[in-house]
Amino acid sequence: MIRTRHDHLHALKTQTFDLLVIGGGITGVGVALDATARGLRVALIEKGDIASGTSSWSTKLVHGGVRYLEQYDFPMVREGLRERHTLIHIAPYLVRRLSFLYPVKGGPLGKAFVDSGLWLYDLLAGRRALGLHHRVGRAEEAREAPLKAPWDGGGFSYYDSQTDDARLALAVMLTAVERGAVAATYTEVTDLIKEDGRVVGVHVRDTLAARDLRTGPEGAADVGGAAGPVFLVRARTVVNATGVWMGHIQRMDADGGIKAQVVPSKGAHIVVPFDRLPIKTAVIMPETSDGRVLFAVPWQGRVVVGTTDQEYRGDFDRPTATDAEVDFILANANDYLETALTRDDIIATYAGLRPLIRIQDTTVSGGQDPGGRNQPGGEPSTGTKDLSRNHVVLSSPSGLVSIGGGKLTTYRLMAHDAVEAALKATGLEAPRRADTSTLRLTGTPGYHELSRHARALGAHYGTTPAVARHLLDRYGAHALAVLELIAARPALAAPVVPSLGYVMAEAVYSARHELVTTLEDILARRMRLNLLDEEHGTGVAHRIAELVAPELGWDEAWIVAEVARYRDYAHMAEGGGYRRDGRDGRDGRDAAARETVAVAR
Ligand SMILES: Cc1cc2nc3c(=O)[nH]c(=O)nc-3n(C[C@H](O)[C@H](O)[C@H](O)COP(=O)(O)OP(=O)(O)OC[C@H]3O[C@@H](n4cnc5c(N)ncnc54)[C@H](O)[C@@H]3O)c2cc1C
């Protein structure tokens, strides 16, 4: 298995691949794994880190989508429910069952309506249901998730599941790499190479080499300049899995004859401390002021509250939650929750762009769109709430295959359809068939057995059962390798930040084994400090950079530049202006974090 970025780049420059994937979000990594499992030689090119696009900004649900029942898109809901079952099986340490409260106001008619919808949801899941929904009385609701009138009269409990989106994508990519795939992060496709009208490769820019080492804290905003070495990568077929950037790649395929519009649909979330919103179950808030659904979901010791479905026209690279979106979330959540949330409660905000597809004219395969909303002649839509979540595969005459739409939950099916289309486009025969529904992701084999012995593991490796549990739940069976780091160097059992479960050893493990290239990769996606830590990880950025420097070959100048770049990045988590309410820091916020805010402004 190739481990270093240097080796991945070398392979990229020297080999010809059967299939090359552009984009390392959940869709692209899924394509890479599907194709690798079929015995194809595969490379993936990602302009940032794995899951640095939409795939780390989701609500983190693996679900059929109760709210999609309203669109009468039952096949899509059933598909999501099947995938939920599959993902719990192939990645049990990353995808877990979660109970949801569906509150109901009003009389028996409203209750009967919701009850029948949830019956349908259970039926669509069939034997894969995670438990049947049931009625929740006023007292139980008050215990599980205290709501206020008119929502405090009880409702229904139903089940779905939850993940860490960035780690799920990483696990899929690592599973492909273990099987021989090449994965080059911080490499951007700048053009397609064509011979006789067919795409036979891509031009790639090494965006990391373009970084200016002289970038100090004041110059942090200048990171990643436009220059950088460009090289060619050859492949028999190319799959465009770039999410909301799909159109950029299609425009490189000038005579591709594809007319499909990516409609970015923005969603924004706030993250609040669990003690301010102590809900023991996720809550779906079905009626908001503009008709969208709001979720409050306990996640990694915090609670994520947010919504999706706002048409968006801004910058794709760094979407942030706006003032208005934060106001919307707070006002609507406060219509339901007994605890009145204010801007002072917010730890972080984030926003993501869902790549919905509106088809105008092309060769389409895969996915389904029973409502016809994505088809030529379908109902035009200005909002995105009514656009279908079904995925579409687009094959251009040049052989370029583009895959878009869909959900985190259905990445495996999207990947299958894209690889099928790519094989068809080139006439390539895969050496073998593969069924990724039974291909357990890295870290899964051995996880259940180790899980039963978390307490003993902690004692054996000189740490606590809580640390062992935390590691098992994040790395699966690879927790053993992290525990071994702790046994060899007990100081690595120290917490990264006091209020979260992360330990220092994780940074070292990630730097060695998890395709890490930058400090941001570690702090924001291997750990999720940008979202979970009140300082967004800026307070520990320098310490972590120094810890991993020997692993990644960083000298002092590079450490300083990495910390500055991370501080600039972490500022995104302060979108929505919630710090402007006269609060420029919470208790315990250190000087480094205050400096970050000052620099970034
Ligand atoms: C707010 C929100 C909440 C959501 N919640 C859920 C949920 O709870 N459950 C669920 O199932 N789904 C959810 N979704 C949907 C899901 O997150 C997306 O469908 C999914 O993450 C899209 O993945 P992707 O790989 O297609 O796109 P991305 O994750 O954006 O990946 C595309 C990648 O391509 C890279 N790229 C772009 N251009 C280039 C280039 N030229 N060269 C190299 N690389 C390039 C980008 O850097 C990016 O990493 C949510 C979406 C949003 C917006």
Image: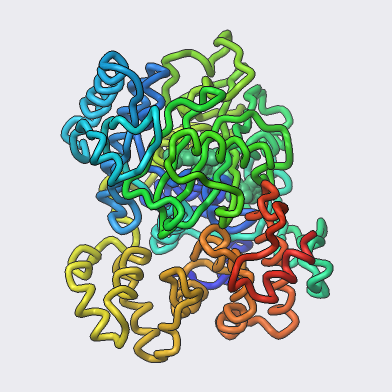
In this rendering, does residue 415 appear at all? no
| Residue 456 against residue 432 in the figure, above or below | below
Between residues 424 and 58, which one lies in front from this camera angle?
58
Which residue lies at the image location 36% right of the left edge and 22% below the top edge?
Answer: 69
Rendered residue at 67%/66% (across/down): 566
Q: Residue 577: give x, y in percent of width and height.
A: 70, 49
Image vertical order of residue 94 relative to residue 404, above or below: below
Q: What residue appears at the point 56 percent right and 10 percent down from the top-left corner?
A: 379
- Compared across the picture, whether 326 is left or right of 491 comes to right
Q: How many marks?
A: 0
Given residues 357 and 295, the one toward you in this image is 295
Q: At x 70% / y 62%, what residue is drawn?
A: 584
Q: Check the image and name the residue furthest to the front.
A: 149
Q: How is the image coloured?
A: rainbow
Where is ligand 1, by quadrant?
Answer: top right
Classify the position of the C terminus by image quarter.
bottom right
Q: Percent from the top left, x then y, of residue 507?
A: 50, 75
**Which image quarter is the N terminus in?**
bottom left
Above or below for 165 versus 569: above
Along the line of sight, the residue nearer the viewer: 424 or 101: 101
**Looking at the picture, how far across and down is residue 546, in whole percent?**
61, 83
Question: On the image, which quarter does residue 274 sit in?
Answer: bottom left
Between 374 and 352, the one nearer to me in the picture = 352
From where the camera sits, is residue 503 visible?
A: yes
Q: Is residue 428 left or right of residue 262?
A: left
Residue 141 at x, y = what percent? 28, 39
> Residue 230 occupies which quadrant of the picture?
bottom right
